[in-house]
Each structure stands twice: as structure tokens, then as C-alpha cells.
Amino acid sequence: MSELDLNDVAVFVRVVERAGFAKAARELGVPTSTLSRAVARLESATGTRLVHRNTRNVSPTSEGQSFYAEVAPAVLALRNAARGVEGSEKEPRGRLRISAPNDIGATVVAALVTAYTERYPQVEVAVELSQRTVNLVQEGYDLALRISAKLDDSSLVARKAGELEAELYASPGYLSRWGVPASIGALPEHRCVLFRPDDGAATWRLQGPEGLVEQRVHGRIGGDDFLFVRAAALNGAGIALLPRMVAADDVAGGRLVRVLPQYAVRGSILYVVYAAARSVPAKIAAFRDLVLSSCAITGASSGVPPARPSQRPAPERAARPRGKRG
């Protein structure tokens, strides 16, 4: 028998208690399909069919009944322990461990974490930056920011924070020396700093007044990290296509200037990802709400709204959004 997932065991107990997936799903605030998959994984791990499924209800098999009798007391004890902790944690406190992509770590994440720790002085925040999609539960993360809603783990929730627009930027020094492009068609005449170029070139697909425009550009400098591309642009290397959140502080400080402001790239979405639960811990809910409110006001830029978010989270209704890159 393979190692059991304790979350799947807890789901199985709740399904048996409520004699069905639908009622258990409503109580937990997750889709019915999430619970069905959890029980199926548990059956696969134990090598035993644990429940009978029909259109009206779910009942345990004889093996499932025996398994339930063994594990239900332990699950109940864990629930009681969790309620005790939850009752004392109305104010966010403890250690919050966050995973985020490198590209937004030094900009939007740093601003959000600074605002968060100022509002909640009893929380210590540890941010780990990586392009890798971490396993939140197994690796001990409380929350992740991702440019994707693709969830391989059905025990997670992904909340859409905002759309990440990318725009064209260059330093004042570059524009003073080489001039400002008057149109998209003038870009090939300029030096460009490219994100993940293909043999020194890239195709920028920009939405503008006339709709979608594709322009092939070339550049002698390229990188696979937006922070590198931003740094090169700051140093006058050329025009760069950057997410607004990455360039926002430099634009506000006059270090970068938006080029051809009527054009932008749209499509990527920022998500807040965390473990599904009927009651989300206060420290996680507070940071989630800060991200959601910040992106709602600023359009996923690096600004942080001054309003204090609610410390007591609303119940989750964890529908899984669709998305790209994980």
C-alpha cells in the first residue's frame, strides 16, 4: 500500500459522515469533483474500493466501513485541535511562507510584503523566489503567487488577482540618444532588449487602436528573467517589453519611460494559490486579501492600497479557474 494522503483521508471521513459528495462539498466550500478525486486517490492508495457510488447517495463498502471506524476518531481529534488554534488566531500571527516567481519578487511582492508586515506586526514573512512550481503542502508553503491557474493538486484553490499587461519601456538616456519610435513599424530600427529571444529575435504581439499587431524585432541582448531585461533597459540597452508591475516603480521614479503607450500585450493572469479549507488561517487570508485588493485597484501593478483588509475571511467558494503556465 502506498503512503496515504491525510487530506484524502479527512475527505473520505467527511463524505461518509454526510452520506454523499454534494453535501460534504458544500460544507468544505470546494467542488464536488475535488472530493470525488480525493476518494478515488485514497482507493488507489489502499488498493481497495471504499465507497459505493450512485446518483442519490454514497455509502461505504464493508472495507470502507472498517477503514472509517479506524480513522474517524483520529480525524475528529485533528479537527478539534484545529478549532482550538483557529479560535485563538483572529489576528494574523506566526510565520507566513510564500513562493513567488523571480520576475515579480523584487517589485510587486516586496511592496506587498512590506505593507503586510506593517499592518500585521505579529507575522514573520519568508519569501522564496523561483520559477519552479512548488508543491505547497509537501514543501510547507502557506501561499504562492503564480502566473497560472493550472492545478495538479485538487486540494488547492487559485484566486485570480489581476491581468498582467506588458508594455514597451526604455530609459530616458536611450530615447535621448536614439529617438522615440513614432510607430510600431519603427521598432525594427531600434535596439531592443528581448525576453527569451529566438536566435536574437522575437515577435511582439501588441493590442492597439487597430487591434492585434505583430512586429518582429531584433536585439543583441536577451534574457530569461524579466528583472534582467528591466535592468538592461534601465542601463540604456534598448526598448524592452515588460510587465507593468515590473516597470511601475521605475516609471514613477522617471527611470523608465513608456514607449508607444497606445500599445500593450494582454493575457497573462496573476493568481493567489493556497490550500483549500473551510476556514483559511488568518495570516493566509489577510495576505490573500491584500493581493486581491491591490490588484483590483492598480490593475496588477506594484502599488498597494492603503485600506486595511478584513482580518476575518469570507467562506471560500473554490471554483478552479483555467490558466496557462504553472
Image: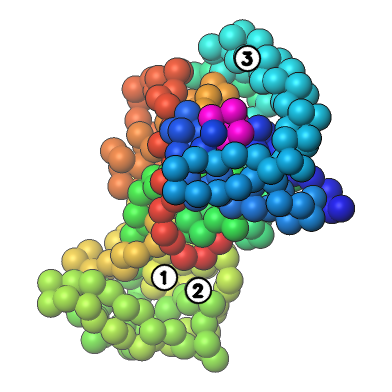
Between discs 2 and 1, the one toward the N terminus: 2
Q: Using the image, determine if residue 321 lies above or below residue 11.
A: below
Secondary structure under the numbered disc 3 in the rendered image: helix
What residue type is disc 3 on?
Arg
What residue type is disc 2 on?
Phe
Q: Is residue 129 visible to the viewer in this orientation of the structure? A: no
Q: Is residue 229 visible to the viewer in this orientation of the structure? A: yes
Give the residue drawn at x 51%, y 59%.
Answer: 150
In the rendering, at what x and y percent does residue 237 appear? 48, 73
Between discs 3 and 2, the one toward the N terminus: 3
* Residue located beneath label 2 in the image: 195
Q: Nearer the viewer, residue 129 or 50?
A: 50
Residue 15 is covered by the magenta coloring: yes
Give the residue drawn at x 66%, y 10%.
Answer: 84
Gap between marks 2 and 1, in whole Å?
8 Å
Query: Given contact means CB atoms under 8 Å apart, are the residues at marks 2 and 1 in contact?
Result: yes
* Residue located beneath label 3 in the image: 83
Q: Residue furthest left?
A: 210
* Residue located beneath label 1 in the image: 240
Residue interval drawn in magenta: 14-18
Gap between marks 3 and 2, in whole Å?
48 Å
In the rendering, at what x and y percent does residue 97 appear? 66, 36
Secondary structure under the numbered disc 1 in the rendered image: strand
The residue carrying pointer 3 sits among few (fewer than 14), some (14 to 19) or many (20 or more) residues within 10 Å by Cα, namely few
The residue carrying pointer 1 sits among few (fewer than 14), some (14 to 19) or many (20 or more) residues within 10 Å by Cα, namely many
Residue 185 is covered by the magenta coloring: no
What residue type is disc 1 on?
Ala
Give the residue drawn at x 46%, y 33%.
Answer: 23
Residue 59 numbered tag: none
Q: Can you say which quadrant of the picture contains the C terminus? A: bottom right
Between discs 1 and 3, the one toward the N terminus: 3
* Image quadrant assignment for residue 138: top right
